[in-house]
Image (cartoon, rainbow, N blue to C red):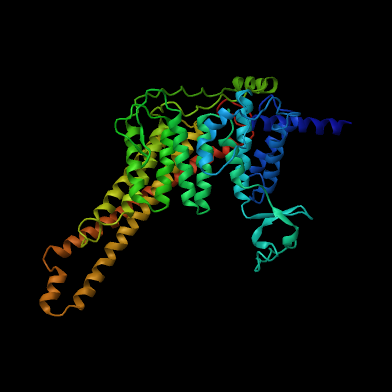
Amino acid sequence: MGLVSFGLLLALISVEVYERRYQTPSEWTFRSRSIYRAAHKIEEPDYSSSGVVEWPDIDNNYTSLLSRLEDPDLDGKDLQLPADDQDRVWVFGLRQLGFTRKGLDVSMKSEEWRRGYYTALMGAARAAEHLDEWVTDRTRGMSCPREYMIGPSNPRPKPVPYGAAAAPLEENCDPATEPPQTFYTKILTTAGFSTGQRLDAALAYADYLDWKGLHESAKEIFDWGLDIAMGALPMGANNTVDTQTGIIKRDATFVSENLLKATNALAVHHAQTSNLSAALPIFLSILRARKQLSLPYFPEPPPEEPTGVRMIVSFIKWLLVSPSYPPPPPTGDEAPIRSPKAICEESAIMAYIGEIMFASPQTDDKSQDISQNQVSGLSWTRDAVDISESTLISMRQDNLDERQVCAECLKTGMDNWSKMVRKMLQDQQKAPSEKQAKIDGGRNWFWAKQCSGATEHGPKAAEQDEGRWERELALVNERMSGVERLLGGEEKLKKAKRSPLTFGTGMIFS
């Protein structure tokens, strides 16, 4: 009896710990809340000792949770299909793309319920992306990539790993889950989600289409996301964005966070599809709009260092009082403030600009080994690294989400800077041999001398240029070691955050 009671106590403590880590709406039934916590727990990279995330189990949890949330006899009481007039408002863009309404009207539910439902839909879409091209063997309840399946549609199946179960037969297989667009479409066609939630779903869906190589379809969804952001601008705002190009206009009177996010995603799409001429002006307009932000930033005071008595009081409070559900995040319809996170996002845009300019075709004197575009791109990238590093150092340590954004910007900018300098040094070292080859192939002594550009200061200038990039490479390597130490500290902060017990901020089981 004592062992049973002790085991029950441990189970209750485990439930409480994970409830505080992955908080659930209080309106949901106990079973739905347990499924939600299980899905999030399995999705953690360090949940499995092997480090492998079991996406079929995650998919089963999220789809089971959605069926309960949409069941009127369980957690979906009072849900209804939207009226026809609402259908026209919410699905205008999607209908043009060939979609039909699949969402519900959840506007009568509380904000906590809606946010949990949205998180479950996004989780199901995320799992469906990872299970793309996977199949499930009905006879064994086993899922695996389609490349292992034996059947007419896969005449050359890949051998299964040693020790794994036998490959499934095609006649016994079904798709492992529904396609991701099923869940993204449901979010985009559900009445009751905020502008930011619908925009995030549209951009995630467009990214998935880009990954599939469906770039034209992705462009249409990116445009739809821009329409979502523009549709929530306040009355009286002028034409903020050129809808043909996605460029934010100079005389824009109001720019929302969602609008910056939508235009940034569109510019990244253009850059990734090698449409640099379309991406660069969008990035420049976003940077201009961000630097014109006028709302001041008032940082919150840092938390006091916990003393021994305060830690004991905090632990007792943790035992007796359940934490409230997290407050709703901003909808994104507001004008952004110039916070440290916003400054880091500016540095990310500068890194994009630098990368695009460095890769742009040479338009100046083509006889030069290093183009002006490369020099400008390097300068933009160097400035991006300086801004992100200084901002990360000055950030509060408890702002982990903002610090992660800044750390990613710093790492990307530093990697780009290193690659650019190495490329320029390589081009500089390769140039003399190419010129010598032209000289050796000259028809006569006069032509060879003209090709060599033989002057007294020419070779010295080349040596100085070569030395310039060697010195900058040495500077990059020295800077890289410092940045790696800084990013290593960020990893320690993240691990401390994931730890069940955290005393450093005065919070226990945070």
Hey, which residue is sitting farthest front in the picture? Answer: 84
- In the image, 57 versus 22, the foreground residue is 57
**Up-down relation of residue 394 to residue 489 (above or below):** above
Q: Is residue 218 left or right of residue 251?
A: right
In the rendered image, residue 157, in percent from the top left (x then y), is placed at 66, 66
**Up-down relation of residue 420 to residue 237 (above or below):** below
Question: Which quadrant holds the N terminus?
Answer: top right
Point 45% across, 35% down: residue? 227
- In the image, 112 versus 375, the foreground residue is 112
Q: Quadrant of residue 152?
A: bottom right
Question: Which quadrant holds the C terminus?
Answer: top right
In the rendered image, residue 475, in percent from the top left (x then y), is placed at 32, 51
Whether residue 61 appears in this view of the structure is yes
In the rendered image, residue 3, in percent from the top left (x then y), is placed at 85, 34
In the rendered image, residue 482, in percent from the top left (x then y), is placed at 40, 45
- In the image, 374 versus 77, the foreground residue is 77
Point 35% across, 47% down: residue? 278
Q: Is residue 447 left or right of residue 126?
A: left
Point 50% across, 27% down: residue? 330
Q: Quadrant of residue 293?
A: top left
